[in-house]
Image: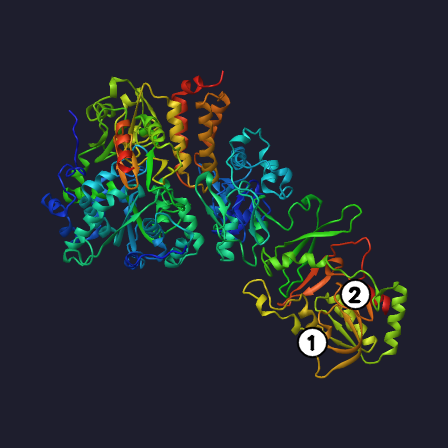
Amino acid sequence: MSFSFSDENILKIDKLKERYPSPKALTLPLLWMVQEQEGYISLDAVEVIATHTTRPAMEIYKTATFYTMFKLQPIGEYHIQLCKTLSCMLCGKTEILEEIKSTLGIEVGETTKDGRFTLSQVECLGSCSTAPMMQINTKNYENLTSKKIEQILKELS
Amino acid sequence: MSLVTIRVDDRELEASDGALLIEVLLQNDIEIPHFCYHEALGADGNCRMCMVGIEGQKRPQIACDTFVKEGMQVSTKSPTIRAVQQEILELELINHPIDCPTCDQAGECKLQDYYMEYGLYDSHINPADKVKHHKHIDLGSSVMLDQERCVLCARCTRFTTDITKTNELGIIGRGDEARVSTMPNKKLDNPYAMNVVDLCPVGALTSKDFRFKQRSWFLSTSSSICHGCATGCNIYIDHNCEKYKDATIYRFRPRINNEVNGHFICDTGRLSYKNLQTNRQREILSEGKVIAEEKAIKQYKKMIEEHSNICILVDANCYNEELEAIVQYAQTIDATLLSPLACYEDETFADEWLRSSQRVANAKGVENLGIKTDIPDGYTTDLLINFNHPKPELIASKKKIEFQSHKEREAYLVFPLAVFSESSGTVTNRDNLVQFCEKAICSNEPVPTVLEWIKKLG
Amino acid sequence: MIQETKLVSRRFKIPKVYQLETALKYEAYDTIKESLSQSPKRITNLVVESGLRGKGGGGAPAGTKWQLMPDDDPRPSYLVVNCDESEPGTFKDRQIISRDPHLLLEGMILSSYAIGANHAYIYIRGEYQSFEAILQGAIDEAYEASYLGKDILGSGFDLDVTIHRGAGAYICGEKSALLESMEGKRGHPRLKPKTKEPEWYFDNPTLVNNVETIASVPYIVKNGADAYRQYGTECSPGTLLFAMSGHVNRPGVYEVAFGTSMLEYINHFGGGMRGDKKLKALIPGGSSCPVLTADEVSKATLDYETLQAMGSALGTGGMIVMDEDTDMVEALKNLLEFYHDESCGQCTPCREGTGWSDKLVGKILSGKGTDKDIDKLLSLADLMNGKTICVFAPAVSGVIRSFIEKFRDEFVAKEQK
């Protein structure tokens, strides 16, 4: 179960090191790099990052647990992140949430049995004028309606 | 550093310009409640408990992030400060589990102490609403973690990051999900790990070794010196004598001495109290059979008369007073006195901090008294009298008399010997510092000390 | 008739202006050659004179911050652009980086030159990953055209710009927490220094400014401080990309001069209330600003001083509009959940206070609350004010206080009978 960066990523890391006054600054960039390469961040990956950043593994680990976007366990192929903060709530997020839950048959925090979708509620995604909205992986889906939800989930299934 | 005068409540104090206010207050015996500040770790500014009023500042300031200036006026007891202390305390307790009845920290817990001093409010909490975390996590190194009790003062994490630099502990998660933890696959594993138990102001980190053994308020405390190595770390011996039982030591704790061990001791030394109570020699034996003291003394004196080439071996753990008495005694019976020190050396034990490679408490005491520490080539003796030295086999001898604290060896005559916690005396550490050990234990049937034996046998 | 004053958003509607080729047709990087041939102090002085105020929520004069950067220090200086935009109701900085990134880069070159920084970073929130391609594309183009990198346009000034991605932590928008994050650590705000000094990145003097603040610099440098001051008010010169969301017909970002009437803004740009409902409440500057009643909104103008005098704040100018059907208890619960999620957990009053107040409002919302709970909420608000390491908790304090004081009857109505 051990982790290693792809060759491409190793080259990126070397270039990145030149842009910062200390290798410790690479902590977040490398956590992202691992997550993009593997889908989540394993403890082995934490050790590798520790070496690159010249920091103890615990420093990397506790940093990773602080940020909500870093996944230390594998999740579904599509991570549905529904915005739950005020503007989205005011514009009908609750109904959208129910729609997603009933369509996929999962609760918030759960993953569909086929491993396709994981559902989370997240705080303000900075797209308040197109509320209610959600992010699936890195893509934004805005001005959501029940119909749109149906469409989007169908497309991704 | 120039000195400045400041005013704290109704007292005038002198302090170095720019000194940390909380240090100045604590050094002057002014009580300031605090969790995250620790003399050996510095301040972290996260508990917010040490708030004081500073003249000229609209809001209360934390004393651990305030630096002393000439003419500073500090109030620690005003109604505003009292209110803030009570409120912050209430917040510390809002998610704190009501574990006191089963928590080892009870009686020496900062939350309890501060509640009695600064709290005493009607609680508004609903236990059902408390944030839940993991309890009784075995971290390794005999340390138990209860994440719910933790006040997130970060003393333990700063200890493993800044002091031991082993980085096992960290705060993970965020907000009120934040909790102390090790990495999932790692344990707390360094020679000083158990110090976090003392550092923890509450019952989050407790000693597995001490778990559920005694209530702290039943313990009596004596000041002593660890005998694990030549560093001579200062310790407290916590002991209790329960009804019908023999007085028992339950734990060692570090005793602050900035010249020797600061605030800490190593785990080996901390747990060495067990040695004082296991496998003890308590009976007088003659060729393996229990005999009465009077008879044994007679036999002993006969042996002394019958032999001319006598060697006395002495353990370098003996107190200076005991060594002096043995020196005198050796002269009176015209015996050669030796205390070989090489056998106490253990390079693997030594480190750059508190652990010395010389695993004995009073080697310097032996040297200072001029006791010979190496064995002449080809030396043999007719009668070897061993006062607890661990390696009497170093001396070739025809007959042996052992004064031993533990059931180590057989001999012609075996006399039981007290351990250091059962009498008082001084030891001299590797830096030639003479340090005093209080007598801690008074057994129901006390075993004689070296001094007592010499009196009886002299 | 109010209209937008497009000082920063001037090029937003031009198709593909994020591509250098197009941007150059509309005066992108116009200020660079001349500015880099003159004293860096010139730029700083212009910014100071313009009265430009930081647009990240604090509103502190930007020039004053710039002047804290040392003149003569052997250590390297850094510029960090704060694109952590996570304040609920705020979505203006994303417009700049996704529509006109070259404007931001131009501002970064000018600002870095002014403070003597050869390395600048854009700390972008992890959730804005989809805009990174555009932003990085603009950066790459700028390097190629010698607007970035070594010896910019032959001036002898070097500047490297690197995007640094956050990972989902609102508190990393607080500048000291942001720098902790950039150092690879948990986003714990730092204890505030006793004297005025710059920020520190790995112990090097650093300037942290919001995206829009930096994006405002090219206009000021090009047109002068007076030109900037002709817009806005005496205390709040210039413009802001005000954002509007919630129960309005046309939510969005519209750049207006400070001093504009809030109600006119909502009606003109927002197209008034959805479904012709009545306005009930409005949060003026991102959720961390005390809520305003409809009556207060009718008297408010969009500037720092007026809102402060009303006991609220302009913040990031992200307005959240609530109509008469809004359940204010539910709205407060929603916000307190946000603060509960986002508290870094470092200091006691915030960590425990945000959790507890969230639970208390939840209790009231579910009909199990009592008068005591309402009073407890108010005293918690008090406790979180002024006793913490950073201003996160005081913001929560203001939110709780304003909701309960101004809409107490709704909280009381939900109490258990």
Residue under circle 2? B450
Residue C187 in view (yes/no): yes
Mark 1 and mark 2 residues within 8 Å of each other at the beta carbon: no
Q: Earlier in the sequence, mark 1 or mark 2?
A: 1
| Quarter placement of the C terminus of chain A | top left
Q: Quadrant of residue A4?
A: bottom left
Q: Residue C188: horizontal and vertical position, in percent?
A: 41, 45
B84 above or below C165? Answer: above
As drawn, A154 above or below B412: above
SS category of the residue bearing label 2: helix
Tag of residue B373? 1
Instruction: Name the spot of residue B371 as percent of width and height, x first.
Output: 72, 75
Quadrant in which the N terminus of chain A is drawn? bottom left
Q: Which mark is residue A138?
A: none
Left or right of B430 on screen, residue C354: left
Q: Residue at x 75, y 69 (%)?
A: B323
Q: Nearer the viewer, residue B271 or A72?
A: A72
Q: At which x and y percent is residue B288?
A: 83, 67
- Distance Cα–Cα, label 1 vs label 2: 20 Å
Closer to the camera in the image, C380 or C415? C415
Look at the numbered disc 1 and give the secondary structure of its residue. Answer: loop
Residues packed near mark 1 inside 10 Å, few (<14), some (14 to 19) or many (20 plus):
some
**B217 on left or right of B13:** right
Q: Is residue B79 above or below residue B230?
A: above
User: What's the residue at 19%, 36% (across, down)?
Assistant: C229
**Mark 2 crowd level (few <14, some 14–19, many ≥20, 10 Å Cα):** many
